[in-house]
């Protein structure tokens, strides 16, 4: 389904136009689902509410500016097609979030119950037979898969030319494999207790940097027919900013305000995530031979009943060990490296300036 808009000024409210495209597409998919069975239609309605109910639309925004940086038009039919292709990234994001919340057994997302918890509650309210937890898990797996399938549908029906589609499929395919590989390594890291900074950084690169910034940028650039040197610069910029984005997310996962982030304080600790922040702290504790701090970190990681008091103790240890400062330093260095790549690439304006603004926005944030 093609987006509407003619000569609309997409850049005046890019997230709003992404929302419009998604709403149109998802309404059509909900109608199709309801024709199959009313129960399927109701389940799809929950998925649609999740997609449309929040999110900063970071990935479509980077894809759009990758397109504009390499000669893509700001409006007209080609821009409308690009907008739909970029919006498809939000459905990959939906799949990742729904499954990630299930894997992590998270209760909330964006301040609301996660998909598996919603369906678990539906099971209870309806007094169905069987296990409500299993039902919630099954529904989340299936709806996450459905979002991923719809993402492919949305890209292929976007209306971008066949030659551009062939170029776009390279980063699109790579991105899907990378994010799922990163997710698996994240799960593996929580059970084999690999606490090295190298392992944490690889997960960061695959699970976050690739599909948050680098591949969306490449997607837009490839659709526009980017020069090889421009692609190289965007890859470097995207990789560095993507890692910096995730490092900021790691800090917010421990130090963020729940009223702003929409998730309970210290959730990353409860889930036992071996982030770069944790890896830096563990390495520092070993280097200082500080067994007390190392023991505290190991005690809080993966404790689902972690209290706010223990979360605060962990925050103090992470700060005292220099892990917070080390991560902040990495963010600063990566942002500087990304800006250098951007400023030497000779990209079209206003895209180059907007990408620089986005880089700061996603690495210096509180949610």
Image (cartoon, rainbow, N blue to C red):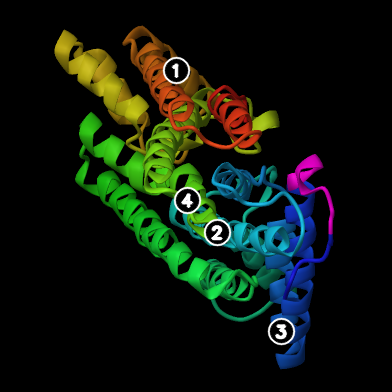
Residues at marks 2 and 4 touching, judged by CB atoms closer than 8 Å: no
**Residue at the spot 40% in from the left edge and 37% down from the top edge:** 233
How much space separates mark 2 and mark 1, taking CA atoms? 28 Å
- The residue pinned by badge 4 equals 226
**Residue at the spot 40% in from the left edge and 15% down from the top edge:** 324
**140 to 256, vertically: above or below:** below
Q: Horizontally, is 350 left or right of 95 in the view?
A: right
Residue 105 showing in the rendered view? no
Q: Nearer the viewer, mark 1 or mark 3?
A: 3
Q: Horizontally, is 218 left or right of 232 in the view?
A: right
- The residue pinned by badge 1 equals 315
Q: Nearer the viewer, mark 3 or mark 4?
A: 4
Residues at marks 1 and 3 touching, judged by CB atoms closer than 8 Å: no
Q: Which residues are magenta?
A: 7-14
- The residue pinned by badge 3 equals 33
Whichever of labels 2 and 1 marks the residue nearer the N terminus, that label is 2
Asked if the stretch drawn in magenta spans residue 366, the answer is no
Q: Nearer the viewer, mark 2 or mark 1?
A: 2
Pinpoint residue 20: horizontal percent, then vertical percent: 80, 59
């Amino acid at each position: 389904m093609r987006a509407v808009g003619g000569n609309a000024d997409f850049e005046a409210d890019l997230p709003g136009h992404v929302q419009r495209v998604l709403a149109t597409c998802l309404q059509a998919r909900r109608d199709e689902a309801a024709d199959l069975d009313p129960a399927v239609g109701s389940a799809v309605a929950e998925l649609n509410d999740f997609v449309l109910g929040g999110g900063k639309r970071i990935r479509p925004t980077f894809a759009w500016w990758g397109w504009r940086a390499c000669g893509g038009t700001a409006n007209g039919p080609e821009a409308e097609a690009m907008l739909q292709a970029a919006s498809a990234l939000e459905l990959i994001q939906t799949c990742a979030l729904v499954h990630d919340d299930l894997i992590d057994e998270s209760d909330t997302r964006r301040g609301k119950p996660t998909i598996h918890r919603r369906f678990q509650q539906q099971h209870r309210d309806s007094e169905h037979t069987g296990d409500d937890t299993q039902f919630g898990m099954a529904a989340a797996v299936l709806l996450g898969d459905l979002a991923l399938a719809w993402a492919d549908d949305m890209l292929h029906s976007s209306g971008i030319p066949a030659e551009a589609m062939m170029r776009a499929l390279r980063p699109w395919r790579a991105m899907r494999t990378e994010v799922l590989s990163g997710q698996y390594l994240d799960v593996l890291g929580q059970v084999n207790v690999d606490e090295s900074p190298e392992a944490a950084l690889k997960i960061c690169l695959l699970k976050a940097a690739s599909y948050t910034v680098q591949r969306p940028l490449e997607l837009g650039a490839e659709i526009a027919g980017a020069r090889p040197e421009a692609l190289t610069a965007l890859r470097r910029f995207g990789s560095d900013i993507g890692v910096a984005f995730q490092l900021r997310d790691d800090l917010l996962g421990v130090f963020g305000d729940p009223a702003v982030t929409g998730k309970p304080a210290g959730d990353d600790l409860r889930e036992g995530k071996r982030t770069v922040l944790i890896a830096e702290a563990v390495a520092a504790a070993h280097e200082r031979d500080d067994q007390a701090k190392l023991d505290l970190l190991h005690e809080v990681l993966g404790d689902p009943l972690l209290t706010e008091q223990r979360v605060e103790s962990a925050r103090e240890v992470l700060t005292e060990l220099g892990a917070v400062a080390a991560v902040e330093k990495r963010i600063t260095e990566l942002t500087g490296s990304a800006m250098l790549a951007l400023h030497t690439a000779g990209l079209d304006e206003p895209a180059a300036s907007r990408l620089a603004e986005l880089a700061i926005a996603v690495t210096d944030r509180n949610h």
